[in-house]
Image (cartoon, rainbow, N blue to C red):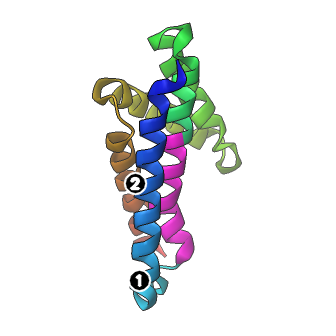
Amino acid sequence: SGTGLFPHVAAGVTVLLVLLLGLMQAGAAVPAYGWIDVVIAVIAPVVEELMFRGAGYSLLARFGQTMAIVLVGVLFGLGHYVQGWSVVIITALLGMLWSVVYVLRRSVIAPMVSHASFNLIEVIGFGLLT
């Protein structure tokens, strides 16, 4: 049933609002990397985890835990298609991993933190290469 979804959505929205408020208060510190980096590293993981692990998994769980994990991962990977097929495969596997974490922890918070950490490492790594 969808009754278990509300706490996850409410927690995610709360986290997102707190992050946005912090960014607004940071002001001059944000442009050092740029807003797109903030979106990639922080906001996208919050929104994606709410969509895929929170809502997506909850909607697909009726087909069984394993099927939901695989489908959510595949859909997550396909959502990154514009970055190429290698990224689709990697993000599909990451999506499955984060779905397992979601199932084990019964919360989107741990996948959000892991996803944001992964993206932050990517943003910093890309920044060091350019």
Seen at 55% across and 32% down, the residue is 55
- Magenta stretch encompasses residue 44: yes
Query: In what element is the residue under mark 1?
Result: helix
Q: Which residue is mark 2?
A: 116
- Dividing the picture into quadrants, the one containing residue 29 is bottom left
Query: In what element is the residue under mark 2?
Result: helix
- What's the amino acid at mark 1? Gln
Image height of 110 relative to 70, above or below: below
Image height of 10 relative to 37, above or below: above
Q: Farthest residue to the bottom: give it.
A: 28
Q: Which residue is mark 1?
A: 25
User: In this rendering, would 2 be left or right of 103?
Assistant: right
Seen at 49% across and 25% down, the residue is 3
Residue 123 appears in the rendering: no
Of residue 43 and residue 31, the one placed in the foreground of this image is: 43
Looking at the image, tell me whether mark 2 or mark 1 is earlier in sequence order.
Answer: 1
Magenta: main secondary structure equals: helix
- Magenta stretch encompasses residue 117: no
Nearer the camera: disc 2 or disc 1: 1
